[in-house]
Amino acid sequence: MNADSNGADSETRVLVVEDDRGIAESLVRGLRQAGYTVDGVGTGRAALSSPTPDVVLLDLGLPDIDGVEVCRMLRARSDAAIIAVTARGEEADRVVALDEGADDYLVKPFGLAELLARIRAVLRRRRPAGPEVVRHGPLALDLRTRQVSVDGRAIPLTPKEFGILECLAADPGRVVSRQQILERAWDAHWYGPTKVLDVHIAALRRKLGVPGLVETVYGHGFRLGAPEEPP
């Protein structure tokens, strides 16, 4: 693998699916300058017939097939990281794209620096090191399929919730700081308030439903703890 100073790997293939020629050319040029191998297509059919890339930048407003349907079909056939790139900014549109398999969502207009950071983030999540399935007490975390279960029961998580859990599960019992979790699950250059993490931690605990599994270590961060035994 050959990585440049921006962290881009020249062996990482990015497929830009964008019907606006001016936007497409700008994206392809910027990504190539950042060190990625890039192809560009302008239709959903062309995207579906292209060789499987590592990352897909997918415009949802395509001229032939709705981008959400393209996202669903791509996810069914590959584990490529998919970033929906679109002018649709409504929450409902974001939710639909994420539910159909998108790993992240960018609303136009956006800067190249933000796009590159999002690509790095989804690649980190899509290329975990170590075992594919992490088990801790009743918890099972499949890093390849990004599926989570507790006592065999599937637990649907958002990408951010999965990212938090993946970060904690990398070394159960070790305390992970707020900033480390934000850099892993959000972005390597996150400078926003860390309180946003508390909202996602609370939702994660509620979904997992196992008291003591996600522990707060006050003043330090969070860790996967020993689940409390039922009375």
Image (spheres, grey):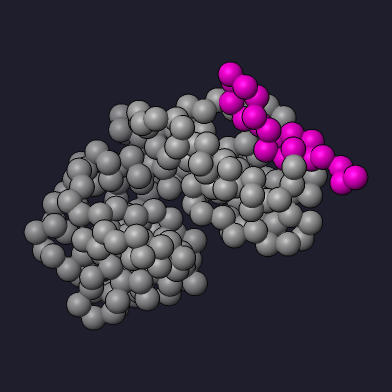
Among the 4 quarters of the image, the one containing residue 120: top left
- 223 inside magenta stretch: yes
- Residue 153, given in percent of the width and then of the height, sits at 73, 62
Front residue of 228 and 42: 228
Among the 4 quarters of the image, the one containing residue 92: bottom left
Residue 29 vs 16, above or below: the answer is: above
State the quadrant of the N terminus: top left
Where are the magenta residues, as a range? Answer: 212-231
Front residue of 5 and 65: 65
- Residue 15, given in percent of the width and then of the height, sits at 30, 59
Q: How many marks?
A: 0
**Residue that lies at the very extreme toward the right in this rendered image:** 231
Residue 231 seen in render: yes
- Residue 46, given in percent of the width and then of the height, sits at 28, 74
- 6 inside magenta stretch: no
Residue at the spot x=59%, y=60% of the render? 156
**Residue that lies at the very extreme toward the bottom in this rendered image:** 64
Residue at the spot x=49%, y=47% of the render? 160
- Residue 218, given in percent of the width and then of the height, sits at 62, 22
Residue 189 vs 104, above or below: the answer is: above
Residue 135 vs 61, above or below: the answer is: above
**Residue that lies at the very extreme toward the left in this rendered image:** 22
**Residue that lies at the very extreme toward the top in this rendered image:** 219
Query: Taking 13 as reference, is 179 left or right?
Result: right
Residue at the spot x=31%, y=71% of the render? 67
Front residue of 206 and 186: 206
* Secondary structure, magenta segment, majority class: loop
